[in-house]
Amino acid sequence: MAVHAVLFEEKTPYTKHDKLFKELIHTFFEEFLEVFFPEVHQEIDFSAIQPISEEVHSDLIKGHTRRLDIVIETKLKKVDAVVIVHVEPQNSKEEDFDSRMFQYYSLLYNTYRKPIMPIAVFSYPQEWEKREFIISFSSYEVLRFNYKTLHLKKKNWREYIHSNNPAAAALLSKMGYDEKEKVSVKLEFLRMMANMQLDEARQRLLYGFFETYLKLTDEEEEQLMGEIKKSPEAEKLLELPVSYEERGIRKGFERGIEQGIEQGIEQGLVKVAKEMLRKGMPMELIAEVTGLSSEVIGELNEQL
């Protein structure tokens, strides 16, 4: 089986959607499937996952290839399989998305010749989405291609605050909430962070992702701090490592937010690279997956 997920993103200045989403799903692949696609999660043996080549042939005659953001191989609990998650940020809905989803499926199947479970994940604000691609000739249906979907804006963020799932925590920032709920959403995000046992690199990754898409004003930050102090969990919440954005607000450093996001991403990439090195994966492949230079990966390898 393979899992093929496509993420659609609205464009926001000064953010790196591709890198953020790619790193989030790479780092929390199991947790992502567990919370949003439990029926797929229960079929997969996560002890066997490893990234594979991200290139698939889009034109066999001319030799053109297309690079997919995330390609992960694993086994099902009962049979061998390939699991593929493809993250592709987009700035708007696409009327022909269904045909493109089928094209990706066909390219992947042509490359790997394995069963594929396609999943589309949407985070744009429009309600529009498609779940199938149909080819028909007159009254004869030639093909009906179906894929699973997750539309984040249609999800009620309150349904996920007790999951203690890091993927869900980060993606609260992309779910459906009103502007007046922003402080409450961030408060619940912090509560989830306080209840999860994560190393600092992964905490920074989640902070960086969340604060990229849900930003509070100074006034809202003050309101948040007031809510934290009134909370029964105040002591635990106040012990959390302060995010770089919050440090920037409190100390008045305007460049703190952007710098913190970059550092959080970098730390998460290093964490993933080290884990891949420990599993004996090729350094060239690790460079493709993480975007880190071969020199940096070489240094990390010497540290292990």
Image (cartoon, rainbow, N blue to C red):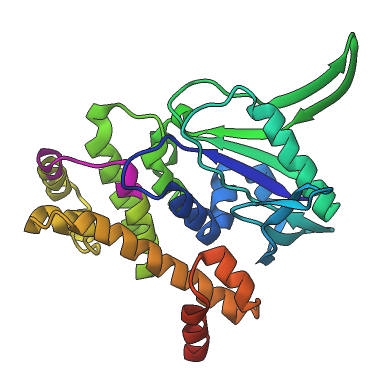
Residue farthest to the front? 62
Q: Against 228, is 267 above or below?
A: below
Using the rendered view, name the quadrant where residue 100 is placed. top right
Residue 51 lies left or right of residue 137; in this view the side is left
Q: Residue 94 in the image: state x and y as whole percent.
A: 57, 26
> Depth check: 239 or 71 in front?
71
Residue appearing at x 54%, y 50% in the figure: 32
Q: Against 139, is 80 above or below?
A: below
Residue appearing at x 69%, y 56% in the figure: 55
Q: Residue 98 in the image: state x and y as whole percent.
A: 68, 28
Residue 158 is at least partly visible in this image: yes
Using the rendered view, name the quadrant where residue 107 is placed. top right
Residue 198 is at least partly visible in this image: no
Residue appearing at x 70%, y 62% in the figure: 53
> Depth check: 67 or 30 in front?
67
Most common secondary structure along the magenta stretch: helix
Residue farthest to the top? 139
Residue range in magenta is 210-221
Q: Against 78, is 294 above or below?
A: below
